[in-house]
Amino acid sequence: FMFINSIERMFFQRTDWGLSMYVRSGNLDRFLLYPIDTLTLISANNFTPEQIFTNILSIVLFIYSLIQLNITLTWMMALKFFILFIFALVFIYSMAMLRFSIIIRVVVMNRLGELFRAIKNFALYPINIYGPILSAFFKYILPISILTNYPTSVILNRSLENIQYVILTIIVFFILTRLFWKNAIKNYASAGG
């Protein structure tokens, strides 16, 4: 979770505030003129390099944990872990697109990032502690379980229960948020209205 969280903060932490300022001032128009994906350009423009140290620390802690727990990674475990990591990044990116789409539509949404971080923090705990209804919600509707539970299951050599549905949910979530983002950009009216 620490590694995924630091990657999210590195690329998207300042983007909430920056995007809101660009929309209010009309400077988003400048980003729309470039022949590159607007979201990629805005995220790169608001990159937070100090999170690199958190990334390094999280990798060190991960390796230390593996050593302390006497866990030996096989190639198959590493491959599964990497695939789940990629899907976790896709999910984080989708959540960012949803957040940024809302910012473009509403213009001023000061605490929106905090709301999304609070939702993401549900992944700090094992999904099964939330009971069957919330557990299913966090797997198949808003799949935050991909951030920690499934990667941890791979490392601990546990069953990846219904992972295909979680991955399908992430793909559908990505497509829907991408459509929502494109619609928000299409309906953007600039600062002049």
Image: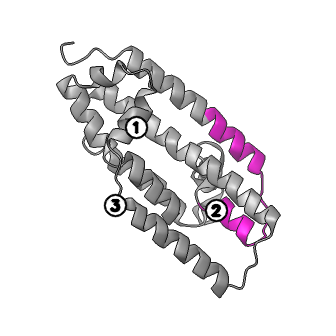
- Tell whether 17 sits left or right of 192: right
Q: Earlier in the sequence, mark 1 or mark 2?
A: 1
State the separation of the CA atoms marked 3 and 2: 27 Å
Residue 104, given in percent of the width and then of the height, sits at 33, 27
Q: Earlier in the sequence, mark 3 or mark 1?
A: 3
Residue 82, given in percent of the width and then of the height, sits at 68, 56
The amino acid at mark 3 is Glu
- Tell whether 84 sits left or right of 45: right
Residue 108 seen from this side: no
Residue that sits furthest to the front in the current view = 35
The count of marks equals: 3
Q: Residue at x 71, y 70 (%)?
A: 155
Q: Which residue is mark 2?
A: 149
Residue 147 seen from this side: yes
Q: Residue at x 69, y 46 (%)?
A: 166
Q: Which residue is mark 1?
A: 99
